[in-house]
Image (cartoon, rainbow, N blue to C red):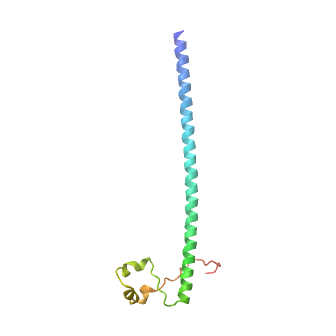
Amino acid sequence: MAVIEQRDTATASLEELRAVYRARIDQLAAERDEARREAHRAKEEAYIARANLASLTARVQELLAAAARHLPDLAVDGPDDVPALEGRTGEERRALPSERRALPAPAADTARSDGSR
């Protein structure tokens, strides 16, 4: 009789262990699925952000080109100009060669807002 009770106890313990194991596997699968969904959302957001940045960059280039046409003496300091201009006064900046002060040309492969190139 004691052997049957031990076997029933062992079987009950095994069933309890299986249930806990199954619950843990289900929890991990749910966490994995949520992580995959978040990664997918993050990739989509990054794609949209890159597209928005490219659009804004193209628009800024168009505006700078338009400003340069209307204001030929306009000098815009871009990121490439920073080392050459550090520590210089306004007069010294104006004395720099024109190639250092010129506006950057619009990118040739950037589509314009009207669809033409």
Q: Quadrant of residue 58?
A: bottom right
Residue 55 position in % (x across, y down): 58, 72
Q: Residue furthest top?
A: 1
Q: Which part of the image, by quadrant, shows the C terminus?
A: bottom right
Name the foreground residue: 13 vs 87: 87
Residue 90 in the figure: left or right of residue 63: left
Q: Residue furthest right?
A: 114
- Count of marks, rendered view: 0
Q: Residue furthest front?
A: 90
Name the foreground residue: 44 vs 61: 61
Above or below, 75 against 111 in this view is below
Q: Which part of the image, by quadrant, shows the N terminus?
A: top right
Residue 86 position in % (x across, y down): 36, 79
Residue in the picture at 53% in, 25% down: 14
Residue in the picture at 56% in, 34% down: 23
Residue in the picture at 52% in, 20% down: 10
Above or below, 39 against 64 in this view is above
Above or below, 4 against 46 in this view is above
Q: Quadrant of residue 25?
A: top right
Name the foreground residue: 87 vs 68: 87
Residue 76 position in % (x across, y down): 47, 83
Residue in the picture at 56% in, 59% down: 43
